[in-house]
Amino acid sequence: MKLKYFGRKGLALISLALPIAAVAQAAPQHAWDQKALSSGERAALVLKQMTLDEKIAFIHGYGMPIEPGADALSNGGAGGNVGVPRLGIPRIEMADAAYGVTRSAPNGRYATALPSVLAATSSWEPKSAYAYGALIGTELRQQGYNMTLGGGVNLTREPRDGRTFEYAGEDPLLAGTMDGNLMRGEQDQHVLGDIKHYAINDQEDGRFAVNAEIDKRSMRESDLLAFQIALEIAHPSAVMCSYNRVNSVYSCENDYLLHDVLKGDFHFDGFVISDWGGTHSTAKASHAGLDMEQPEDFFYGAEMKKQVQAGTVPMAELDDHVLRILRAEFASGVVDDPPQKGVVDADHGNNVAQTLAEKSIVLLKNDHSILPLDASKPMTIAVIGSHADVAIIGGGGSAQVDPPGGSPVPPPPPGNGVFDALIRPAWFRDSPLKAIQAEFPKAHVVYASGDDIAAAASLAHSADVALVFGSQWSAESLDLKTLDLGPDQDALIAAVGKANPRTIAIVESGGPIVMPWHDQVGGIVEAWFPGIRGAEALASILSGAVNPSAKLPVSFPLTEADLPHPKLNTPPAASEPHINKGDTLHDVMKELGDGLPTFPMVYDEKLKVGYKWYDAEHTNVLFPFGHGLSYTTYAYSGLSVERTATGLTIHFTVQNTGKRAGDEIAQVYAALPASAGEPPHRLVGWSRLALAPGESKLATITVDRRMLSIFDEKQNAFSLLPGSYQLLVGASSRDLGLKQEISLK
């Protein structure tokens, strides 16, 4: 069933205490102010009153606020449009907001840094994703913005992608469900929502020029399916088309992606917005379905007006672009309920961030139940490495939330490039050392930076337990060169583990990493980029005050040689922007619009993304998709499968067989008939169950028919093949103890 969401109706509540004059002022001034009309009807009424120049001004940006000469009325975000002031249509004010509102500090503002999107996805809990989005939406409004530029849902085809932390993992059902609920939470606060980067935008190196080569079936069952699911849940105002080409055509002028699939098959009725500098033509982009150019007007300004007047772009086509934006503004509530600037509730944001982090941190390894540590007992705890005395790290680029008070770890000096000031590591003032000291008041907690490996190993040897931190920073515009932590950090963790068998490695990363030292430590905790209260959340996990429940949304390979593309696809020099000293953002955006020489990225793994690749290739992994340990144990039993008109209903029982309360994320996979030509199995559903010690619960999971189908290119539709299907249930993609076959027609 297609789920549509239009936001809450902005009902104006008028106090009886208001004077008559104030009530009179609230009366509708325009025909489209009547809230009883549909958003489409209201938009059509506005459109009839707009001049050609107003329509043209409505479909492009005004330059980035940090660019000299940009619109002085801007709120200071990433961009927007000028609205139609004489008709009461507000400006669109956009802010990057992947894991919090960015660039707040220059305006003296505060924004909560949440755990990364990939971290939040590790909760496998749609209501947590909704809370994530609701907080961002609230803080956007409090800072004067009415549109988010978050909502990344690209699948992890390339785990070294610098923006993996902004996305929601490697499986389309999980990614689409979590991102859809996140965006639904944002839009419920009356902001224009956005889902990006459409499509197959799965690497950062050479992102402006790379040509993703992939067949239609593989797209529709993987990357595009994730978008489809998110769209059905959130009904977002906008979809951002990406920089890259797909099968030799730029995404922002790709008729198949925009016209045939997004606006056709997916019935998307919002507007398509280009990534910044991602527009490359006027008529071709317009015909394909691009509705708004950002951040400037190279193609959708004077050139668009010229082509409309010449008939190259029909007036009806221009009107459709404008109508889609207007309709989204009315549907989202930004016209009836515009943002009112206020003070961000930092305490509330911090509390939400900590709760989300506690549900996001994954316990990967726990030999001999080394965790949790007993906070009631005196002990010596050595905390080592990765600036754990003062900070935790976050992801960089346009997603970077300004650290309150500045980064306590000085970043390297910026280079001379236009983007260099944005692409630098930043750390948040949240000290794991202090949080651990507070959580373990009877312990003697000592710290070593790890710069001297021998000294760190000596400290670890003298302690009852060693907590060694490792971090891997990642950011927009550059891919990771390797998936390891680097030779120094790897050597440090190995040395500490050798010095003390009770060593727990704690990793802060934007995505999966390889761990050459994994056999040398007793425990491994994946903290991701955990947000502004990540240290407190981590301490609660270590003490057992919070029982870990998160599970991996991505596979962790043993080595990079096991990846579908072991060698990173790096672009030729000609395919990267040529930024000269003194170049402005305008210069860079102009170069991007002109286009750069393309180079190929052939996704010959096709359907086999993430765990599907490793399973199909019979490759061992370090930690499988869906893996995550707890301080209690669970047992599965009683699997039954029922056919329904729309798919299947799966029933099974999960029991907490341990002595602690905990949440288990029970997963359902399906193996399709051999004639389908699919990977061994795919995720088709899951249930997160809260269980007291000894408690049993019946899990009931509805599996949509589409999740059991393949995409038939000839029919241009998902098709269920007749044959025998196997349903598999368990704790991860490689721990599936319950199995049942069923014949479907």
Image (cartoon, rainbow, N blue to C red):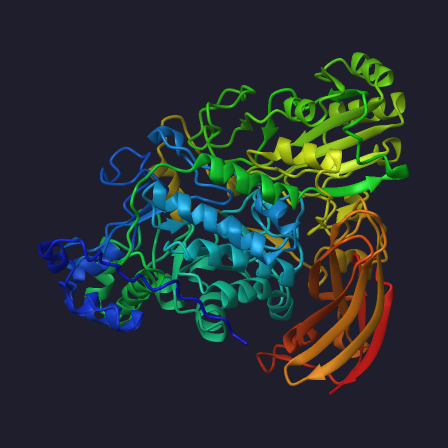
Q: Nearer the viewer, residue 213 or 149?
A: 149
Q: Could you say where residue 592 lies in the image, as x and y percent from the top left?
A: 42, 45
Image position of 247 with respect to 641: above or below: above
* Displayed quadrant of residue 524: top right
Q: Nearer the viewer, residue 481 or 451?
A: 451
**Image quarter in which the C terminus is found:** bottom right
The residue positioned 17% from the left and 62% from the top of the image is 52
Q: Nearer the viewer, residue 589 or 12?
A: 12
Q: Could you say where residue 169 lies in the image, as x and y percent from the top left?
A: 64, 52
Q: Could you say where residue 671 lies in the image, as x and y percent from the top left?
A: 79, 71
Image position of 414 with respect to 121: above or below: above
* Extreme-bottom residue of the structure: 745
Q: Is residue 313 visible?
A: no
Q: Could you say where residue 163 lies in the image, as x and y percent from the top left?
A: 57, 44
**Image quarter in which the N terminus is found:** bottom right
The residue positioned 87% from the left and 17% from the top of the image is 461
* Displayed quadrant of residue 614: bottom right
Image position of 95 with respect to 188: above or below: above
